[in-house]
């Protein structure tokens, strides 16, 4: 009896430790410190952009009939809960390679939603591609600009090959993030604590373009949204992976559908059979980042490594990854003025992360369009 009591005392003595571990282990295992400071995240689908006959510049393999690809163009409004400082992540202008379905740009959408441009403390460029920088001349000079230290800030016409203009920087305070001296690292990615209280981090994710950033937004003390920028353009480039499948099993109806909808001429897994694809035994993402000469990834090798690191967040129940151009999420995200911060309580991640293998989803690109394997 004494031995039993001793064991019981031991069990109940360590139970609080396990309970605490269950609460904190997920995000704490990434080295993230605990904090009660949070931000609120709202997302805009500013436009839908079709890349004409250039899918191979973003993803591989490109199956017959998918040579043109449609992407969303997400922008994010981030508001610090305590100070009410507001940030915009990404923006939008147009270019000849893309066909945009665009009614209003982000400054117009903000103002239509009752958000004055003078209330925006800073605009954060995930990188300096045209669809992420917006038109900074529309923001007052009180709005700062935050960029990665490796961002090429040369402007046209002083530099003939430059894609930026002087108006992108004129009269705005420019903050270049110094990741070289960053003291924080999460999932192998150097991080800067933007507000200094653990509510919002900017991460160095090189590969897509020089100075490419992603963001980690703490929306409750233990749940986060990862603003993935252009770390990937299609959810099939990051999923599935073993830990992801363990934590987010594929819904039964999509597992059944995938046996015939995903082409076994282009995709395979250990338990697949001819014309019968098996999702569960697939251990690597279905698609990969483009490494062709016309790739939109400046350094595909570094981009893949950055994506592997972000994939650790994607597989974790405390993190919801939203990439700037992930079309698979378009039907699932609560767009502005709704908040995205309640994603975990609403189980949004469980409902959305397998959308990309649903043949009814507009992002589906895993079979030739003629329906044959």
Image (spheres, helix red, strand yellow):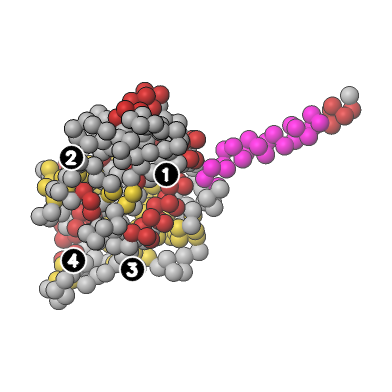
| Residue found 54% across the figure and 52% down from its top | 31
Cα distance between the residues tagged 1 and 3? 30 Å
| Residue found 16% across the figure and 61% down from its top | 137
Disc 3 secondary structure class? loop
Residue 332, x across and y down, in percent: 30, 32
Q: For this rendering, which residue is in front, 209 or 6?
A: 209
Tell me the quarter of the image containing the C terminus: top left
Which label is found at residue 65?
2
Q: Which residue is mark 4?
A: 164
Disc 1 secondary structure class? loop
Q: Which residue is mark 1?
A: 284
Which label is found at residue 150?
3
Residues rendered magenta in the picture: 7-28
Disc 4, disc 2: CB below 8 Å? no
Among the 4 quarters of the image, the one containing residue 189: bottom left
Chain-order first, disc 3 or disc 4: 3
Cα distance between the residues tagged 4 and 1? 37 Å
């Amino acid at each position: 009896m004494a031995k039993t009591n001793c064991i019981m005392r031991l069990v109940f003595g360590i139970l609080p430790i396990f309970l605490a571990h269950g609460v904190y282990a997920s995000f704490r295992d990434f080295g993230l410190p605990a904090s009660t400071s949070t931000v609120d995240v709202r997302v805009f689908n500013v436009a839908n952009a079709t890349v004409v006959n250039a899918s191979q510049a973003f993803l591989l393999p490109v199956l017959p009939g998918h040579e043109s690809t449609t992407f969303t163009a997400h922008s994010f409004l981030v508001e610090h809960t305590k100070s009410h400082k507001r940030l915009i992540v990404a923006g939008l202008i147009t270019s000849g390679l893309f066909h945009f379905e665009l009614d209003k740009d982000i400054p117009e959408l903000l103002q239509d939603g009752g958000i004055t441009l003078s209330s925006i403390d800073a605009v954060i460029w995930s990188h300096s591609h045209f669809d992420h920088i917006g038109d900074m001349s529309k923001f007052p000079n009180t709005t700062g600009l935050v960029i990665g230290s490796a961002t090429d800030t040369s402007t046209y016409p002083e530099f003939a090959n430059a894609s930026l203009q002087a108006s992108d920087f004129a009269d705005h305070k420019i903050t270049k993030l110094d990741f070289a001296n960053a003291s924080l690292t999460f999932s192998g990615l150097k991080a800067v604590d933007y507000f200094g209280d653990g509510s919002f981090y900017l991460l160095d994710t090189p590969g897509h373009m020089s100075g490419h950033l992603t963001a980690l937004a703490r929306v409750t003390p233990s749940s986060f949204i990862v603003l993935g920028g252009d770390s990937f353009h299609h959810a099939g480039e990051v999923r599935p992976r073993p830990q992801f499948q363990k934590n987010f099993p594929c819904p039964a109806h999509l597992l059944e559908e995938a046996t015939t909808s995903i082409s076994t001429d282009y995709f395979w897994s250990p338990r697949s059979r001819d014309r019968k694809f098996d999702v569960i035994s697939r251990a690597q993402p279905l698609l990969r980042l483009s490494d062709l000469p016309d790739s939109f990834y400046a350094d595909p090798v570094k981009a893949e490594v950055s994506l592997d690191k972000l994939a650790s967040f994607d597989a974790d129940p405390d993190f919801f990854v939203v990439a700037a151009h992930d079309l698979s999420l378009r039907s699932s995200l609560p767009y502005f003025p709704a908040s995205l911060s309640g994603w975990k309580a609403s189980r949004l991640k469980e409902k959305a992360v397998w959308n990309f293998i649903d043949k009814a989803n507009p992002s589906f690109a895993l079979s030739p369009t003629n329906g044959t394997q």
